[in-house]
């Protein structure tokens, strides 16, 4: 049985369209990652005798990285066993996922990467169907 997957990915969520020979399945995976702010600056608390500063930049960056790692692991677990894979979306998430697939040695015969803007669920499904019809 031929299993083809189209994946629109961003750091916040991914839309996965799984095409089997008989049916089409659409799944949404949320990352739980908030907005990643590069410059935060330390703020003082108003209460006496408490920690002088709130969470530091390195702690917030670590949380961001941990959530992205869980997000990518979740996606990779669903991708395993695919015959063809189309990854598209805005930003760097698609390239980061491609590196993770290579690092974890996920065997997919045909992987293609494309740039795409924000899309609705229907637009993603239509793009994946059109791509795999060719």
Image (cartoon, rainbow, N blue to C red):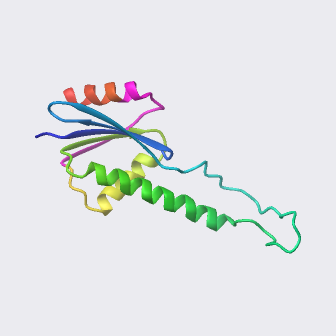
Residue 15 lies, with reference to residue 69, above or below; the image says: above
Quarter containing the C terminus: top left
**In the figure, is residue 71 to the left or right of 131?**
right
Quadrant for the N terminus, please. top left
Q: Quadrant of residue 29?
A: top left
Residue at left offset 70%, top offset 65%: 55
Which of the two residues, 90 or 47, is positioned nearer the viewer here? 47
Residue 24 lies left or right of residue 64; in this view the side is left
How many numbered marks are there? 0
Position of 29 with respect to 110 (left or right) is right
Q: Residue at x 87, y 63 (%)?
A: 46
User: Does 96 appear above or below 130?
Assistant: below
Residue range (magenta): 109-124
Q: Is residue 134 visible?
A: no
Q: Position of residue 94 (x, y in %)?
A: 40, 46
* Res 7 quadrant in image: top left
Say which residue appears at 33% left-offset and 28% top-offset: 125
Q: Is residue 121 magenta?
A: yes
Q: Where, by quadrant of the figure, is residue 4 drawn?
A: top left
- x and y, in percent, of residue 69 in the image: 44, 59
What residue sits 81% from the left and 71% below the top? Answer: 52
Measured from the top left, where is residue 92 in percent x and y? 47, 47
* Residue 122 drawn above or below residue 28: above
Q: Is residue 102 something that shows in the picture?
A: yes
Residue 47 x/y as whole percent: 87, 66
Residue 7 part of the magenta segment? no
Q: Is residue 123 left or right of residue 78?
A: right
- Looking at the image, the residue that sits furthest to the left is 1
In the picture shown, does residue 91 fall above or below 72?
above
Of 131 and 68, the residue lying toward us: 68
């Amino acid at each position: 049985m031929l299993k083809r997957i189209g994946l629109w990915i961003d750091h916040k969520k991914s839309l996965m369209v799984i095409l089997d020979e008989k049916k089409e399945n659409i799944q949404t995976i949320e990352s739980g990652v908030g907005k990643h702010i590069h410059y935060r600056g330390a703020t003082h608390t108003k209460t006496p005798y408490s920690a002088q500063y709130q969470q530091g930049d390195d702690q917030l960056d670590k949380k961001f990285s941990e959530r992205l790692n869980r997000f990518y692991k979740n996606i990779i677990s669903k991708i395993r066993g695919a015959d063809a894979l189309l990854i598209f979306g805005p930003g760097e998430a698609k390239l980061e996922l491609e590196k993770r697939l290579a690092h974890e040695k996920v065997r997919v015969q045909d992987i293609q990467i494309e740039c795409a803007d924000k899309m609705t669920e229907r637009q993603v499904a239509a793009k994946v169907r059109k791509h795999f019809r060719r």
